[in-house]
Image (cartoon, rainbow, N blue to C red):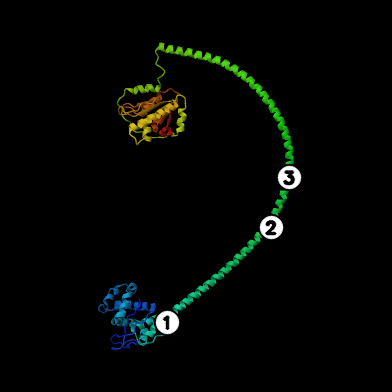
Amino acid sequence: MPLTEPYDDHLPEEGSSTAAPDGGAEPGAGAPEPEPTLPEPVRQRIVTLTAAVLPGLPADELPVPLRRVAKFAPNRRARLGAPVIAAQLTADPLFRQRVTARVLADAGDLGAAVVEGTAPAAADPVEVAALAYLARPRGWRELIEASGAAVRAEADSAVIAELVREAEQRATRAEHDRAVARVEAEKLRDELARVREELGQLREENRQVQRTLRETQARERRANELLATERGRAARAAADSDAELRRARARLAEAEAAAGVARASAKESRSVDDARLWLLLETIGQAAVGLRRELALDPVEKLPADFVADAFADSSAVTPAGTAARARDTDDPARLDQLLALPRAHLVVDGYNVTKRGFGEMSLEQQRKRLITGLGGIAAQTGDEVTVVFDGAERMHGLPPTPRGVRVLFSRKGETADELIRRLVRAEPAGRPVVVVSSDREVADGVRRHGAYPLGADSLLRRLARS
């Protein structure tokens, strides 16, 4: 911020021999001259010198706006208090005189020389201008102008030096670029020589390839001539083969006619044998029915699982069993389809083990209904026997009509569905395929020991989803 407020009187400190300033105005004289425009370095130096002496002034000699600035740290005092310091130096001559006395005392010989209106040639022009502004001896404006000229000259010298340095740098880069270009040119020349050498080698290889091509074409012509000869021989051989084939087909037709006569004769004989066998089986069947009726044997329509079901038919109260650890055997529905395709297969399903795994968000009644309906579809598709077993604490109500081919059992009091499933497996005769669907490892291990095929619950759920 430039110091522009005018000040025309220079009042030295008591005992000072400083002469009246050259730019001061006598009382009753004309208007004071305006403050000179200070170069920026000079203005900053004046603020710095003033900020340095502020803490040494008595508090009553400090203007009120500067009392708070005087308490700042040295590095912040000149930076943050610059506007206030500049304003007080311009507006308060007495304050400037007090600051000047202390600054001149600190400046020593240079301050004395500036007060006398002279300045050493080797002195810093910025320092001289700052001291001259504060002390304001005769000719202080000329000193400030000379300092401004010196500062501008130094700035111009710095600009010129920077331009020279940039020119030298450009010259250095140009020299470096020329050196790089020379190196690249050498590389290109070497690369050109190498390419020419490779081109010569390629031309030589091309001549060799052309010679080889001509030799190959000559061999190809000879091979075509031999091929034409062999084709003629092959055509004659094919004609001979066709004639022999026609003769073989004629013989085959004669043989097929003879075989047809033989098959007709065998079919007639087999029809007689079948009639005899049917008569024999019918006689045996009627004899067996009569014998069963005479001996009062049970009907054969009942299956082994029906006997286990009868044992549970009269039970009305059951208790649930603890949940067993789950385990997977296999969850592939294709495996389930393969086992159900076996003759007279029996599918046994651990009911709640499957429904809670696949329809756990539904109520128990909806779980049972959905599973029984799906098993009815499997029984209708495969024709196999299907039994589904549930744990039950009491007689269940709201069961859907049992589909044809599906048997629904509830465990009775004191037993779990797992035990009932093992009882069903043990009731089957040896050799009959029994498939047990449960993810309970204990159930799977138990039925496997009795010859059944255990599968995971996911295999049945995926099979039902596919249906």
Q: Quickly name the residue at label 2.
A: 200
Give coordinates of residue 32: x percent, y percent.
32, 85
Give the SS element for disc 2: helix
Give coordinates of residue 436: x percent, y percent.
41, 29
> Which badge, 3 or 1, is on the more N-terminal residue?
1
Q: Amino acid at mark 1?
A: Ala
Is residue 176 shown left or right of residue 107? right
Callouts 1 and 2 close, C-beta under 8 Å: no
Identify whether 67 is placed above or below 457: below
Q: Quickly name the residue at label 3.
A: 219
Q: Quickly name the residue at label 1.
A: 149
- Which residue occupies the extreme front position in the image? 30
Label 3: how many Cα within 10 Å (few below 14, some 14–19, many 20+): few
The reply to whether residue 350 is in sight is no
> Which badge, 1 or 2, is on the more N-terminal residue?
1
* Quarter of the image where the N terminus is located: bottom left
Distance from Cα at disc 3 to Cα at disc 1: 101 Å
Quarter of the figure with residue 85: bottom left
Is residue 86 shown left or right of residue 281? left
Give the SS element for disc 3: helix
Q: Nearer the viewer, mark 2 or mark 3?
A: 3
Identify whether 24 is placed above or below 321: below
Q: Residue at x 52, y 72 (%)?
A: 169
Distance from Cα at disc 1 to Cα at disc 2: 75 Å
Distance from Cα at disc 2 to Cα at disc 3: 29 Å
Give coordinates of residue 460: x percent, y percent.
42, 32
Q: Amino acid at mark 3?
A: Arg
The reply to whether residue 343 is in sight is yes
Give the SS element for disc 1: helix
Give coordinates of residue 421: x percent, y percent.
38, 27
Judging depth in this view, the residue of 401 and 452 nearest the camera is 401
